[in-house]
Amino acid sequence: MDLEQFAALRTPEGSAALDAAARVAGGDPLTAAAALRSAGVPAGLAAAALTQAELRLRATGKFGPAARGMFLTRAGLEQATRGVVARRRAERLRAAGVATLADLGCGLGADALAAARAGIRVYGVEADPLTAAMAAANAEAAGLADLFTVEIGDATAFDVTRVDGVFCDPARRKAGTGRRIFDPSAYSPPWDFVTGLAERVPHTVVKVAPGLDHALIPAGAEAEWVSVDGDLVEAALWCGALAQVPRRATLLREKEGPVAGAEARAFPLTGSGDAEAPVGRPRRFLYDPDPAVVRAHLVAELAGDLDATLADPSIAYLYGDEARPTPFARCLEITDVLPFSLKRLRALLRERRVGRVEILKRGSALEPEKLRRDLKLAGGEAASLVLTRVAGAPTVLICRPVPA
């Protein structure tokens, strides 16, 4: 899409095309396109409207009902923060006293809109003219145009003395190709500029990839990893006055709300990130930590809470004698601990008439789907198989889930 096509979508005819596209999106694209053509929508406008309708359907998982009125690009949607995460970040900024915020590289405006809804005046900067236009349109659709404005420009040239807080989500995909960038020095804005913001603005937050090397975390910053319903979605660096602890894993649970649409429940686990958990033999129960806990290097802190140990110092499975309730890990009861042998495992599962297995793995090179085929399962029982290492040796644990 270009600016001319976007402008067409903003006309009354474009709005009608978007409404028509919303009614047919989600099915066969050729059938949807034919339906719009039969309704008299010009081909170019129909294609643009259908693209928006499909993107809005995909965006519902991130933004909820608000996605129905947003303008989106594929790349912008990919990098945009989930609504539940953006809301929580905005609340934390507001609680810290941030009243004016620069969103450098604001994209489609997901974080800026959340901050504006929290009462923060947001100045967005976006280098891409189409994305900037969409962000401004999203602010207008949300009724927040007086609190969130967007300018087209270079994020590094923005005068940060105008604000008391900065949020930056540097682009991590190569322009024109969409390929992921794994080297922070190739981010846009550049990594040295991003990390230098904390020296210029007392309240600085930087959104980063969850796989960020811990060695790149600036001294004194709080590094937080966030998961939503068990999916690791992002990491962020809270700098300056915003830093509270060295490391934090935050688990957000949207699916556990008491009623549909309820605000997510948040579970934080904090620590230094450099503690070590004790190592011992496998015990009766296995804990599989949430990926945010693992990436934050807080497995040792969780082990202390659960009175648990590792069976291998490099594998983030924990073992305990009791099934203690925790939001930070899934718990399974271990029935068998076997040195890995396909023949022996297959025979044992056949003996127990196991026909369905879930396969978890850490520290194993085995491919779960290939193993599933090789087991040639038959029967009506179910089991959980954990492929791992114990004291360096390939091991399989046969387990059954413990109710949450």
Image: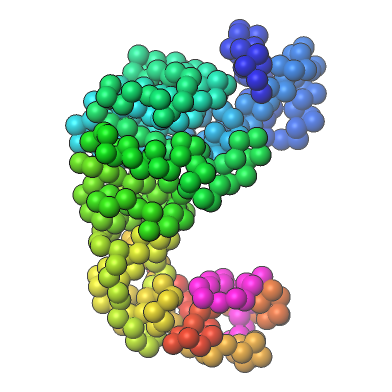
- Would residue 234 be found to the left or right of residue 376 on screen? left
Residue 357 lies in the magenta stretch: yes
For the magenta stretch, what is the residue range? 349-369
Image quarter hosting the C terminus = bottom left
Where in the figure is residue 35, as x and y percent of width and height?
A: 77, 22
Q: Looking at the image, which residue is at 67% across and 28% down?
A: 51
Circle count: 0
401 or 241: which is nearer to us? 241
Task: Determine which quarter of the picture holds residue 381.
Answer: bottom right
- Would residue 187 be found to the left or right of residue 355 on screen? left
Residue 339 lies in the magenta stretch: no
Residue 1 seen by the camera: yes
Where in the figure is residue 258, as x and y percent of width and height?
A: 34, 46
Q: Looking at the image, which residue is at 37% across and 46% down?
A: 236
256 or 294: which is nearer to us? 294
Q: Is residue 34 above or below residue 241?
A: above
Q: Residue furthest top?
A: 12
Q: Is residue 364 above or below residue 106?
A: below
Q: Is residue 243 above or below residue 348?
A: above
- Would residue 143 be found to the left or right of residue 45 on screen? left
Where in the figure is residue 255, as x and y percent of width and height?
A: 42, 49
Q: Looking at the image, which residue is at 29% across and 39% down?
A: 198
199 or 37: which is nearer to us? 199
The colour scheme used to paint the residues is rainbow
Q: Is residue 203 above or below residue 232?
A: above
Q: Looking at the image, which residue is at 27% across and 44% down?
A: 239
Residue 285 seen by the camera: no
Image quarter hosting the N terminus = top right
